[in-house]
């Protein structure tokens, strides 16, 4: 009995659809990157003579409008809620930097409510965010 061996074909990878896959991957990455965007409140930044740049990624940001409204991650909160958020975040990370972003026309009494909370919690790592002079 004579058995003949069939010639094996070399496996090939179809590259016709590679551009489609790359395009879909690009769309996917663009959509995912939009999910983690920073929610900002429209304010007019104050100016300062002396500035220091800090890393803004791992900080707690509190936005204060000229009307005294306090925002955290784009949501309107009360001063009492802000106190709870600050206390919880400091408990998790004692070296957390808190950024206060206030409109240039915000009366200081509105900023002082947050400052008093930080004073009670004895937290001293605070930045008042200003407009960068070019």
Image: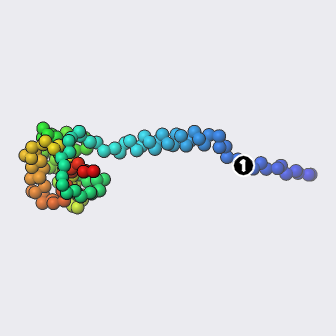
Name which residue lies at 7% across and 46% down.
Answer: 109
Determine if residue 64 is in view: no
Q: Quadrant of residue 119?
A: bottom left
- The answer to whether 93 is drawn above or below residue 103 in the figure is below
Determine if residue 28 is in view: yes
Q: Secondary structure at mark 1?
A: loop
Q: Nearer the viewer, residue 7 or 118?
A: 118
Name which residue lies at 17% across and 43% down.
Answer: 103
Q: Nearer the viewer, residue 89 or 23?
A: 23
Residue at the spot of label 1: 11
- The answer to whether 67 is drawn above or below residue 98 in the figure is above
Find residue 57 and report its horizontal and vertical position in percent.
30, 53
Q: Quadrant of residue 78?
A: top left
Q: Nearer the viewer, residue 105 or 6?
A: 105
- Answer left or right for 65 relative to 7: left
Q: Residue furthest right?
A: 1
> Count the marks: how many?
1
Name which residue lies at 22% across and 56% down.
Answer: 51
């Amino acid at each position: 009995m004579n058995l003949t061996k069939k010639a094996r074909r070399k496996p090939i990878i179809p590259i016709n659809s590679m551009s489609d896959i790359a395009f879909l991957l690009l769309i996917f990455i663009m959509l995912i990157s939009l999910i983690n965007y920073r929610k900002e409140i429209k304010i007019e930044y104050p100016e300062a003579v002396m500035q220091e740049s800090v890393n803004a990624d791992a900080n707690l940001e509190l936005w204060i409008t000229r009307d005294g409204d306090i925002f955290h991650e784009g949501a309107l909160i009360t001063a009492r809620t802000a106190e709870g958020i600050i206390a919880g975040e400091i408990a998790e990370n004692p070296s957390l930097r808190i950024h206060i972003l206030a409109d240039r026309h915000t009366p200081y009494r509105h900023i002082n409510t947050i400052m008093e909370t930080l004073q009670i919690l004895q937290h001293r790592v605070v930045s008042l965010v200003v407009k960068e002079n070019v």
